[in-house]
Image: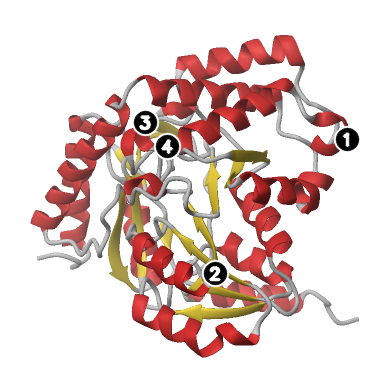
Amino acid sequence: MADKFAWITEEMTALEGQGLRTNIRTIGSACGPWMVVDGKKVLNFCTNNYLGLANHPRLKKAAQEAVEQWGVGPAAVRSIAGTLELHRELEQRLAAFKGVEDALYVQSGFCANQAAIPPMVGKGDVIFTDRLNHASIIDGCRLSSAKILVYEHCDLADCERVITENIGQYRRALLITDGVFSMDGDVAPLDKLFELCERHGIITMVDDAHGEGVLGHGGRGIVDHFQLNGKFDLEIGTLSKAFGVMGGVIAGKKVVIDWIRQKARPFLFSSAVTAADTAACLAAVDLLEESTTLVQKLWDNTRYFKEGMHLAGFDIGASVTPITPVMLGEATVAQEFSRRLFAAEPGIFAMPIGFPTVPQGKARIRVMISAAHTQDDLETGLKTFTSIGRELGVIG
């Protein structure tokens, strides 16, 4: 009898040969600037822990106290019996933090995009989307059944062309863009996109996953960075990156959030976020509102590391954020570079990223800088990257 899964073996072998098979490492410690990965203590340049909050004592204390008061799980969806007082408090605090009318707290940033897009547009409508938007946006668009029209990455002229050629053919229109693009670290021209959408009556939506805690005053995000607070119709956020915890947020005008609360399937049909996560997120908001020190440290570290990589001769793309892509080209080179980083003493944890996450021929190591890194950590990273870069002929 033929092996009905032989095709999987063949496909996996092909991925291996192309340097595209993902090898998942196992974490053996709390997330921080140094971590235990596959049993080895290594310098962490891989996680999205921008502000070092993932193991912060105030967040841990808040989570522990919430477990004692509320238990380990709500045991219900939000719309039936799962909305805790903590959930509503966090939504109100996040809305105030972002300068919007209302917010909805959901299970993850990925869920937030799947929750927000289908209620806003459907069959007979159109979505204008940046070519490099995150997978969660792409999936949310597909779920909506709206027509999906792609404009070239951060290309305002092409976006305007696509809009003007198509806008009159559809009932409603929605423009969606990432704020900070996670693989390249560049930023959408949000102010210009907003002006364009206003002229054509298009609903606006931005995914601020990598902007929260990073851009804007005290980490209030890309909308604050462009001084558009309260003007964008929808802001999508995640609480698993700079906030260091788990969950997603849909923020914006009250009429819009009320509608999404009625129609969002991940909100209506999946259990609520735990009290421990919610309380930890509230503690993170407290920290960001109290001081801008962590955000300032993040940017100091970013400037120091990027300058060092540039002086060493690395191509770090067009990033203007703490995301630092070390451009290597072929996936096999990126995988070998990552393996050598991990094997070094001390080792560095920085995973390779290749197709389909990034285009063919654009493989890279993506370095994620954190406020928790010391200058010695950054010096260690620069020294090791430079040594391996020379070994592999990436730099002279």
Q: Is residue 228 above or below residue 1?
A: above
Per the image, the residue denoted by label 2 is 202
* Residue type for callout 3: Trp
| Label 3 vs label 4, nearer the camera | 4
Q: Is residue 18 above or below residue 278?
A: below
The numbered mark, 3 or 2, whose residue comes first in the sequence reads: 3
Residue at coordinates 25% horizontally, 32% vertically from top-left?
Answer: 296
Q: Are marks 3 and 1 in contact (CB under 8 Å)?
A: no
Given this view, does label 2 or label 1 mark the residue nearer the observer? 2
Which amino acid, by three-letter code, is at mark 4? Asn
Residue 295 found in image quarter: top left
> Which quadrant holds residue 135?
bottom right
- Per the model, the C-alpha gap separating discs 2 and 4 is 34 Å
**Residue 146's spot in the image, x, y percent?**
69, 75
Label 2 Cα crowd, 10 Å radius (few <14 / some 14-19 / many 20+): many
Q: Is 198 in front, or is 257?
A: 198
Q: Residue 139 sits in which quadrant? A: bottom right
Query: Residue 256 in the image: x percent, y percent?
Result: 66, 51
Secondary structure under the numbered disc 2 in the rendered image: loop
Q: Mark 3 or 1, which is nearer the eye?
A: 1
Residue assigned mark 1: 80
Q: Is residue 339 above or below residue 270?
A: below
The answer to which of 145 and 73 lies nearer the viewer is 145
- Cα distance in 3D space between marks 4 and 1: 33 Å
Distance between the alpha carbons at the discs numbered 3 and 4? 12 Å
* 221 lies left or right of 377: right
Mark 3 and mark 1: span between their CA atoms?
42 Å
Most extreme residue toward the right is 1
Name the N-terminal-most of marks 2 and 4: 4
The residue indicated by pointer 4 is 49
Which residue is identified by label 3? 34
